[in-house]
Every structure is written in C-alpha cells, then in structure tokens.
Image: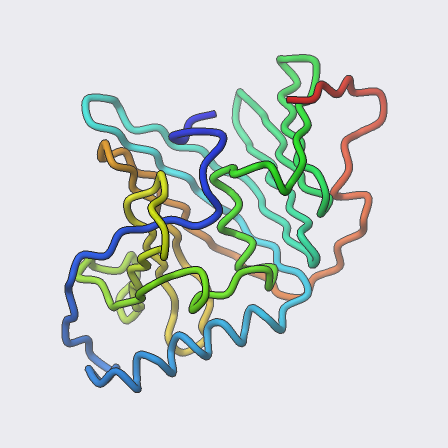
C-alpha cells in the first residue's frame, strides 16, 4: 500500500493558525460555521455516492506516484475502491470487515472494520458515520490554493494526536460537493485524492461490497 501506514487512526490533521479572506465567503466565524454545518448536513443525507478518483502520493526524496480508479460508497459503512492500471487492486468494506485484494497476490486480507485504522477510514464522513465537530477540535479556512477556482479548502485539527499531521478538505461552496481530500504525515509525505464525475444516491447492490467467489481470505 502506497500511503503511510495501513493502520492509521480514523481522523487526522494538524492546524496551522491561518484565517484568510476568500472571495464570496465572509471572514466572519458565523459564515464559516454555516459552511461546515451545510457540508455535514449534506453528507448525512446521502445514501450512496460514486466517483472517479485520482490519488497522487508524494514523499520527500521519492518520486511521486499516481493511481486512479473508481469509488463507490453506501451507508452504512460500505466502501469499494477499484484501482486501475497494471497493478489492479480492490479494497472493500461490508460495514463489518475490510478486505484488500490484489490479483497478483492470489489472496485477500481481512480485518475487522472496528480494528482497522486504514487511511480510507476518513471517508466514513461521506457515509454519515463521522461528525466534524466531535471528531475535530478546530476547522479553519486554509491558505492553500484550491485545485479549482472558487472552491474552499478547510484545514481540520483532531482532538487527539494522530499519525496524520494535516487533513485538508476542498469543497465547492455552492454545491457542497467534495473535490479533494489531502493527507500529510509528520515526515512530509502527502496523498491527495481528487474526485470527478461525482454521482449521489446511485444504485449500489450489496454484491458490490463482497469479494468474488473462490478468493482465499487471510485474516490479519
């Protein structure tokens, strides 16, 4: 797995005290609070979400790595990540367990969702399992430029120390659509997930969140 660790905490981030004027959004705390509340409310109402994603991982001294694929989320706790490319991989959650399968390995690994602190766990927010105000001590507008003009970038600070140093969330303030999630660890390594072709409340059969028959499963 290309990101920092397979057993990361559920939510992570570190706050650098920056509040900047952004066009179209008042600097008042109340305006920022309304953006956070609206974002939380929207994803609480979602039943499912599908999107294309690009993952870009960079680390000091290493060449950047780029992967892409398709993501499917469904309440409660279902996730499916299909990675494209030469090294195809599949990551699944059925709401109770998480599975990772690479055809080249010939077997899948399994872990309890409760015990797993996988880096994909923060996407639980999109499934209505996370609560921004409870999980994070502070949320502020960030100085980092958005990937798309007009978007807002929020920097989130966890209540407890985590492996991740920074969690950045980029959203479209009009549609409240998630555009990017970025994770930065304490050594400066970073993974950015950029989303496109986002579809909300799409059909998502339970079979999409189970491994194909006949695959050997090994517990971790």
Q: Position of residue 30 (x, y in %)?
A: 30, 86
Report the label total: 0
Image quadrant occupied by the C terminus: top right
Q: Is residue 72 above or below residue 203?
A: above
Which residue ends up furthest to the front in the rendered image?
A: 160
Q: Is residue 218 above or below residue 6?
A: above
Which residue ends up furthest to the top in the rendered image?
A: 105
Judge by depth and name the residue closer to the eye, 151 or 137. 137
User: In the image, what residue occupies the spot 55% across and 31% down?
Assistant: 84
Left/right of residue 86 with respect to residue 188 in the rendered view: right
Left/right of residue 162 with respect to residue 188 in the rendered view: right
Q: Position of residue 43 (x, y in %)?
A: 55, 68
Which residue ends up furthest to the right in the rendered image?
A: 213
* Residue 215, image quadrant: top right
User: In the image, what residue occupies the spot 41% across and 31% down?
Assistant: 3
Q: Position of residue 73 (x, y in %)?
A: 64, 53
Judge by depth and name the residue closer to the eye, 188 or 144. 188
How was the colour assigned to the protein in this rendering? rainbow
* Residue 103, image quadrant: top right
* Residue 192, image quadrant: top left
Q: Is residue 209 above or below residue 126?
A: above
User: In the image, what residue occupies the spot 65% across and 25% down?
Assistant: 101
Q: Position of residue 67 (x, y in %)?
A: 44, 33
């Amino acid at each position: 797995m290309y990101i920092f660790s397979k057993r990361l905490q559920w939510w992570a981030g570190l706050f650098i005290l920056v509040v900047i004027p952004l066009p179209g959004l008042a600097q008042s705390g109340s305006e920022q609070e309304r953006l956070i509340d609206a974002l939380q409310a929207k994803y609480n109402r979602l039943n499912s979400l599908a999107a294309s994603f690009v993952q870009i991982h960079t680390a000091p001294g290493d060449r950047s790595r780029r992967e892409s694929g398709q993501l499917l989320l469904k309440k409660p706790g279902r996730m499916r990540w299909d990675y494209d490319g030469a090294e195809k991989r599949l990551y699944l959650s059925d709401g109770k367990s998480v599975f990772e399968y690479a055809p080249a390995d010939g077997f899948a690994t399994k872990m309890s969702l409760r015990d797993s602190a996988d880096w994909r766990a923060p996407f639980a927010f999109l499934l209505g399992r996370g609560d921004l105000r409870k999980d994070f001590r502070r949320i502020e507008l960030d100085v980092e430029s958005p990937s798309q003009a007009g978007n807002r970038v929020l920097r989130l600070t966890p209540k407890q120390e985590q492996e991740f140093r920074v969690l950045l969330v980029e959203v479209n303030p009009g549609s409240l659509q998630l555009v990017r999630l970025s994770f930065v660890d304490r050594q400066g390594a970073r993974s950015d997930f950029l989303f496109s072709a986002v579809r909300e409340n799409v059909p998502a059969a339970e079979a999409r969140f189970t491994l194909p028959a006949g695959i050997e499963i090994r517990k971790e």
